[in-house]
Amino acid sequence: MAQIDKIVQAMRASRANVRFSDGIKVGTHYFGKCRIAGSHYIFKTPWTDDAWINMQNDRGKMKPYQVKQLLDAIDKLEGEADA
């Protein structure tokens, strides 16, 4: 868990240059195993709106907008856990 927290903190500090493998680790921790469709790694979220998080490997890195989507989903998930 500490390693996941460190990765998430680094993602929050900068959405650029986030390793794709780190994104997969974080996504798997929060949302379970992903399914793969071509170059897309897709995580299912528990909500009916925006129910998917889509990631693509861009030369070993995540695309910054996909990092934002992952962080937003984590925030939403944690917000519901706190409520």
Image (cartoon, rainbow, N blue to C red):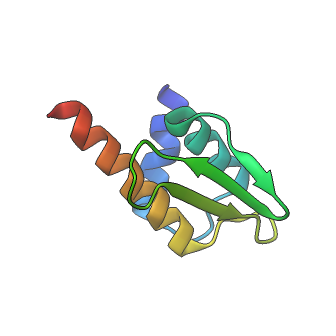
The answer to which quarter of the image holds residue 40 is: bottom right
Along the horizontal axis of the image, is 41 left or right of 75? right
Name the image quarter holding the C terminus: top left
Which sits in the foreground, 42 or 9? Answer: 42
Left or right of 29: which side holds 58?
right
Nearer-the-camera pick, 71 or 10? 71
Taking the view exactly as shown, the residue that stands out farthest to the left is 83
Task: Please determine whether, in this image, residue 24 is positioned above or below residue 65.
Answer: above
Left or right of 62: which side holds 13?
A: left
Looking at the image, which is closer to me, 56 or 51?
51
Q: Residue at x 49, y 36 (%)?
A: 30
Residue 28 in picture, x, y percent from top left:
61, 37
As drawn, the residue found furthest toward the front would be: 48
Residue 70 is situated, as x and y percent measured from the top left of the image, at: 48, 56
Residue at (82% x, 65% y) in the render: 39
Give the residue drawn at x 52%, y 45%: 7
Nearest to the observer: residue 62 or residue 78: 78
Image location (x, y in percent) of residue 8: 46, 47
x and y percent of residue 51 in the render?
47, 55
The vertical placement of 48 against 2, above or below, is: below
Which residue is found at the position 25% from the left and 32% from the top?
81
Query: What is the number of callouts on the image?
Result: 0
Residue farthest toward the right in the current orientation of the protein: 38
